[in-house]
Image: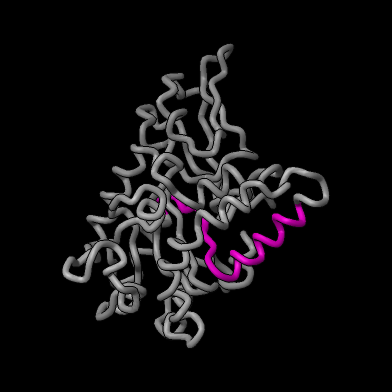
Amino acid sequence: MCEFCTKHGEGKKWYLNAKNYGYDLLSDSKRAPFVRDHLYWTDSTYRKYFNIFKYLPVNIPIIGPTIKAIIKRKYLYEHWGQVVPIEDVESVLAFTNSITRLPCICRKVIFGEEARKCFFISLDPASTGIADIVDQSYFGGPDVARFEKVEKDWVIKFMRESEMKGMIHTIWTFRAPFIGGFCNCNVSSGCIPMKMYKEVTPVVFRSEYICIVNSSICSGCRACLSLCQFGAMKYDKNDKKVAIDLKRCYGCGICRSVCKMNAIRLESRRSKQETFNLW
């Protein structure tokens, strides 16, 4: 399991531990101002800091790993995520009681556009969690309600449809271990964490799983290749089958959404020696 499971999971996946969604964590004297200010901080500092990160010598031996470790330490504490497949999204939504859809922060910062594909989640059915303390006017004016409460079945349907557009699901902390919500994103949507992954260093854990292709079923149609956000899938011209590089796979599982043969399945990351400790 990832290190958050060890620290915050109490023997299970950390994002399935209900304590990590508690309103008492959200109302912490240090966390509440951080959550409230996070939108504005991202908007005002993204380009400045990302441009600095982008040109750091992260690929130079010794220096690079040290820089990456410093960045990771900062984000692990403040705002870290993990890739989760749709099955685990459903598991989380099964015990959370309030879901609020909001516009994507990254999309607003990068493109200045609104795309409502992120969700705040809360255990308290009477509250909307983080949405209770975030100023909606950030997304377009105090007279327009940018946050909307939605039902679980609708969210699952929305996320499954998003997968077919190449959107991966990630779950996020706001000062660990408090979990605030889900994002659905990819590189082309302007996702800042995905840009960090591509150009600097990851700020999310791989999922608890890896994707496995059943070559005896795979038809070689290659529909799944365009969905993979991590460059883990390739087409073997000799076998005329799709194969997965397990060391690159993040276990998001979205490749399954377009596989008409159901040839792709998820397995525990700990089931393979090469991915056992790769997070």
Farthest residue, direction top: 238
Closest to the observer, 163 or 268: 163
What's the residue at 35%, 54% (across, down)? 108
Horizontally, residue 154 falls left or right of residue 172, namely left
Give the magenta part as a residue range. Answer: 65-87
Q: What is the x, y in percent for residue 117? A: 31, 53
User: Residue 73 lies in magenta, yes or no?
Assistant: yes
Q: What is the x, y in percent for residue 202? A: 60, 51
Closest to the observer, 38 or 277: 38
Q: What is the x, y in percent for residue 191? A: 44, 49
Quarter holding residue 248: top right
Horizontally, residue 216 falls left or right of residue 95, namely right
What's the residue at 29%, 74% (across, down)? 128
Quadrant holding the N terminus? bottom right
Q: What is the x, y in percent for residue 32? A: 44, 81
User: Residue 218 lies in magenta, yes or no?
Assistant: no
278 shown above or below 260 = below
What's the residue at 70%, 62% (across, down)? 70
255 shown above or below 183 = above
254 shown above or below 51 = above
Farthest residue, direction bottom: 29
Question: Mainly helix, strand or loop, the magenta region?
Answer: helix
Horizontally, residue 123 falls left or right of residue 54, namely left
